[in-house]
């Protein structure tokens, strides 16, 4: 079965948990915390908290992003908040206002 | 346009809270909470929903515990397990579906409005 996709015309208020990848093309108000990669597409918008193994942001995030392996803030993304991860990539064309903590212990 | 805006809750994922929208959603993982769609809601064979589902059309092939309110129809596929209350103008229950609960088949305005039988 396909991976989880929160579609562009879908809003989730609450928590998204589990062990498989999550793609956000729509809106999530709450927590996304799978033990797997998370991708916030250009149309995606997340407020509050994202935690995954690898987190890629192309859309808008207001809140905290934790990547246990890495975080990528890519061109066109707007990241407003703090990032915790051992490895970070911020592309040209990304907007980032917040703190980065890189002494995060990889699990 | 099938994939335009379509949402999927995959098998390894649990969503707790409220989900809403106007594009179809398939639940192959777990949803605990409330789902309010202006499009078709599908609970896949491996899916589990605990809570309330409101959508024009609701198709259940997996497990559902709670309440379903559909303005058009509800279909329970073979192999599904449903516990709760189903409210809809039309309810289709296939042979092999398991339902423990209440059916409320209302004649709503959507039925008076026509469509095919």
Image: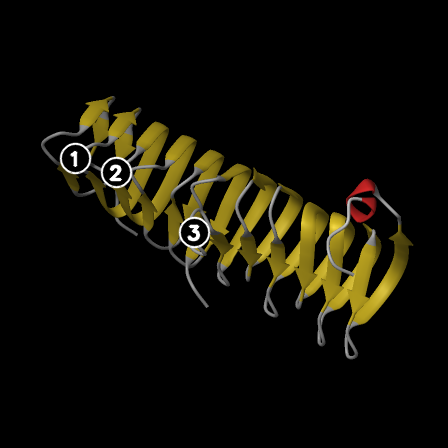
Q: How many marks?
A: 3
**Residue shown at the point (39%, 54%) measured from the top left:** A35
**Residue shown at the point (48%, 59%) measured from the top left:** B10
Q: What element carries label 1?
A: loop
Q: Quadrant of residue A99?
A: top left
In the picture provided, is A39 more to the left or to the right than B8? left
Measure the C-alpha gap from mark 2 to mark 1: 7 Å
Q: Nearer the viewer, residue B39 or A4?
A: B39
Give whichever of discs 3 and 1 has the lower sequence position.
3
Tags 3 and 2 touching, CB below 8 Å: no
Instruction: Tell me, for residue A75, which label it has, or none.
Output: 1
Specify the subunit that label 2 lies on: A
Residue at the top extreme? Answer: A97
In the picture provided, is B14 more to the left or to the right than B70? left
Residue at the bottom extreme? Answer: B96
Q: Do tags 2 and 1 sit on the same chain?
A: yes
Q: Where is residue B93 in the image (x, y as percent from the top left)?
A: 80, 69
Q: Position of residue B72 (x, y in %)?
A: 74, 51
Give whichever of discs 3 and 2 has the lower sequence position.
3
Q: Name the residue under label 2.
A: A58
Measure the C-alpha gap from mark 3 to mark 1: 21 Å
Q: Is residue A68 above or below residue A57?
A: below
Measure the C-alpha gap from mark 3 to mark 2: 15 Å
Q: Name the residue under label 3.
A: A5
Q: Quadrant of residue A47?
A: top left
């Amino acid at each position: 079965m396909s991976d989880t996709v929160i579609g562009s015309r879908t809003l989730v208020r609450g928590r998204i948990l589990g062990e498989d990848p999550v793609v956000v093309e729509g809106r999530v108000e709450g927590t996304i915390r799978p033990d797997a990669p998370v991708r916030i597409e250009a149309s995606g918008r997340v407020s509050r908290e994202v935690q995954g193994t690898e987190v890629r942001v192309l859309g808008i995030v207001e809140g905290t992003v934790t990547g246990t392996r890495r975080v990528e803030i890519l061109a066109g993304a707007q990241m407003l908040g703090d990032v915790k991860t051992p490895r970070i990539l911020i592309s040209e064309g990304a907007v980032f206002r917040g703190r980065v903590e890189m002494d995060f212990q990889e699990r | 346009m099938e994939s335009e805006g379509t949402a999927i809750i995959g098998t390894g994922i649990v969503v707790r809270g409220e989900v809403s929208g106007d594009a179809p959603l398939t639940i192959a993982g777990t949803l605990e909470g409330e789902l309010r769609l202006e499009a078709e809601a599908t609970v896949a064979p491996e899916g589990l929903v605990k809570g309330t589902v409101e959508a024009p059309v609701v198709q259940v092939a997996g497990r559902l515990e709670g309440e379903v309110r559909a303005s058009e129809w509800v279909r329970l596929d073979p192999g599904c397990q449903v516990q709760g209350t189903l409210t809809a103008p039309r309810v289709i229950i296939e042979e092999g579906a398991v339902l423990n609960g209440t059916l409320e088949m209302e004649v709503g305005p959507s039925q008076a409005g026509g469509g095919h039988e």
